[in-house]
Image (cartoon, rainbow, N blue to C red):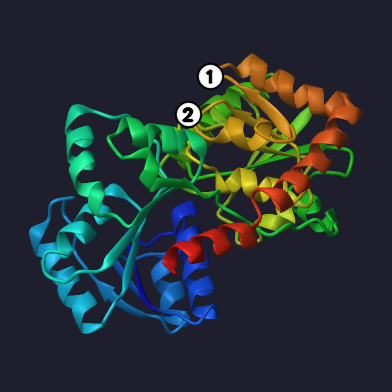
Amino acid sequence: MRIAYLINYAGAGGTEKYVKIMSQAAREAGHEVIFIYNEAGALTEYMKNEGVKSYTLEMKSPFDIKAAKALAEITRNEKIDLVHVQFPRENYIAILSKLWYNVKVIFTCHLLYEPNILWRVTNSVMTRFDKNVIAVCTPVKNLLVKNGISKNKITVVYNGIVPQNKRTSETDIRKEHGLTSEDFLCVLLGRYTAEKGIDFLVDAFEKLRGKAKCIILGEGPLFDDIKAKIEEKELTDTVIQAGYRTNVFDYLLSADVSLNSSNSEAFSFAILEGMAASLPTVATDVGGNGEMLKGFEPCGEIVPYGDADAFADAVDVLMSDSATYDKYAKNALYNLNNHFHLDIMIKKTLEMYN
């Protein structure tokens, strides 16, 4: 089978990780793969280094007829059997391209977006032409149904990851940031954007001053604003901005707890990565966070977004209650192996391809 992966922005976020994983799995399963994108980023470089044939396709809107025609030309010339898309814009363009060259389209929805009349009407028409729709968690499926997509077309396939349950030496990571083995260390992975709630996280750790430390891994447009807030509150020894790092698991395997402070989230790769390191998680009660941490064996604490006291109290529970901590750490790996393992995600998705 010849498969095209279509995405607007080829950056380095969770969706891009998903495309990277599935493109590699498809090639290992004997399929031929091409990559089509609009804005270049880290995923573009990855595909280039992997020798995956790539095309640039400008996609201005969901109903970009010019883009649909260009996509049809690419898929016809490449004899593509299946186009796998990740967002509504690309999904509509791929469906429209079927007017000129008929290919199967699979749409994976990674987003939670509230329905409106326009989306409900267009989805009820357009998504009839999707072969399958994948929701990355149950809340996403429920919202897709509200958005006009037939529930019979939607399958929940959780994102997956491989466990990293062998602890490495934490000395170098902690030493680099002036921490000791006695410090209760929390790690948050996320871009400095409004939806990641890092501003709220700083408020929570103001209440944890002298008790716990937090390292934030990531970059983004609000980095300097958060830095200023940390300095204003005199929290530079409590909340540490490590910037963008490629050795994420070195940090997680050196930590005690993983964090998610988002005000909007579908299915968090950052939470998965914490689970893969056998870490309990404290997360906000948004999107799929509750399903991940409480939907199976409990492996973390869920708190309302914006409640800094509740967030700090949840971290404090994991610091002071070793029985709860140990149970959550054990359950994190159990849930990963039985529900959120990479092999499960790949197997179910490849079955859809076939």
Which mark, by number, is residue 101? Answer: none
Query: On the picture, is 266 further left or further right than 58?
Result: right
Q: Quadrant of residue 328?
A: top right
Query: On the picture, is 345 further left or further right than 279?
Result: left
Residue 217 seen in this snapshot:
no
Residue at point 15% right, 58% down? Answer: 96
Q: Which residue reaches farthest left?
A: 66
Q: Which residue reaches farthest front?
A: 152
Query: Which sits earlier in the primary sequence, circle 2 or circle 1?
Result: 2
Residue at point 50% right, 82% down? Answer: 30
Q: Secondary structure at mark 1?
A: loop
Residue 122 seen in this snapshot:
yes
Which quarter of the figure is the N terminus placed in? bottom left
* Residue 291 in the image: above or below residue 5: above
* Residue 266 in the image: above or below residue 315: below
Q: Are marks 2 and 1 in contact (CB under 8 Å)?
A: yes
The image shows residue 18 at horizontal and vertical percentages of 49, 59
Gap in angstroms between the C-alphas marked 2 and 1: 8 Å
* Residue 194 in the image: above or below residue 39: above
Return the residue nearer the eye: 167 or 90: 90
The image shows residue 99 at horizontal and vertical percentages of 11, 64
Query: On the picture, is 350 further left or further right than 281?
Result: left
Q: Secondary structure at mark 2?
A: loop
Which mark, by number, is residue 306? Answer: 1
For badge 2, the amino acid type reads Asn
Residue at point 53% right, 22% down? Answer: 305
Residue identified by numbered label 2: 263
